Amino acid sequence: MTSLPKLPVSVLIPAKNEEANLPACLASVSRADEVFVVDSQSSDRSVEISESNGAQVVQFHFNGRWPKKKNWSLENLPFKNEWVLIVDCDERITPALWDEIAEAIKNPEFNGYYINRRVYFLGTWIRHGGKYPDWNLRLFRHQKGRYENLNTEEIRNTGDNEVHEHVVLEGKVGYLKNDMDHIDFRDLYHWLERHNRYSNWEAKIYYNLLTGMGEGGTIGANLFGDSVQRKRFLKKIWVRLPFKPFIRFVLFYFIRLGFLDGKAGYIYGRLLSQYEYQIGVKLFELRQFGGQLNVTSGQSTQPAQPSSQPDPVKTV
């Protein structure tokens, strides 16, 4: 059987200790003629797996400030193609989506495309509960787009990678019809560990919204904008509601029909409620103690800011 021709698309995969997910992810992007794995000093076999699958590995050293990994990569990697596709290690690009990408990048009208994502949890596609559709701007002309800065970088333990930030793009954006898959091969321990970090980030977002921090350099909040801007608008209302953990479960499981996804849907809904509670208590911690617990009146509440800069691009 003859292999399909390579497409002029550069794939960017941010990674750290992802040996369980990388083989399937890299196999799914094999139609791209260039693949970069931007690693954060993994201690597992991530680098070996990436190189054995033909990817170029670049090490990113986070300085604790902006930019984080994806924006740094967009600024510094020597992409040979105009179009870049950003794929997380637990995501898969399907053959049908690749066929659509091959045609989409020929269209001079658009500078980028939203891709819908199917999230799998405990082996089940979480189709309800508001988890689908899940649009992400992942394919774009790399000189035209950068991730927004939501002013969360001073919060500790949020990681070195943009996770919930969105791409701000110059020009017209389209929507692709075929989905990509989000399938994490790791266990629930890693899901909980990851969302413990995410809740630090979310608490700072809530804090920024409650204190009226400006939206310059972000996608903005707009009730009449695209799906991502509408979510950002609704979040401004959400952060002011009481009993959010309870409301989040009711919204997910009953109002948005999460119960139709069976046992996996119930567990996912309960975990999202727990996640919302984590965000709430960390927001309290942030507002009362500057992000630290057990702070007395004589102690500083401002964490130290590292001053080192990322190393220049280098392969390993």
Image (cartoon, rainbow, N blue to C red):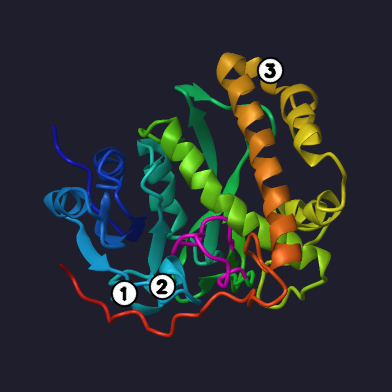
Magenta includes 158?
yes
Q: Confirm whether residue 179 shows in the render.
A: no
Disc sitting over residue 77 in the figure: 1
- What residue span does the magenta drawing correspond to? 152-166
Residue denoted by label 2? 74
Residue denoted by label 3? 259
Asked if residue 53 lies left or right of residue 257, the reply is left
Q: Do labels 2 and 1 touch, CB within 8 Å?
A: yes
Query: Amino acid under label 3?
Result: Phe
Magenta includes 14?
no
* Towards the viewer: 308 or 119: 308
* Image spot of residue 273 (x, y percent): 69, 34
Asked if residue 167 lies left or right of residue 10, the reply is right
Report the residue at 40% width, 50% height from top: 88
Vertical order, 96 against 38 (above or below)? above
**For marks 2 and 3 on the same chain, the one whose residue lies earlier in the sequence:** 2
* Image spot of residue 89 (x, y percent): 36, 47
Q: CA distance from mark 2 to mark 1?
A: 6 Å
Query: Amino acid under label 2?
Result: Leu
Label 2 Cα neighbours within 10 Å, binned few <14 / some 14-19 / many ≥20: some
Secondary element under disc 1, as helix, strand or loop, is loop
Give the quadrant of residue 306.
bottom left
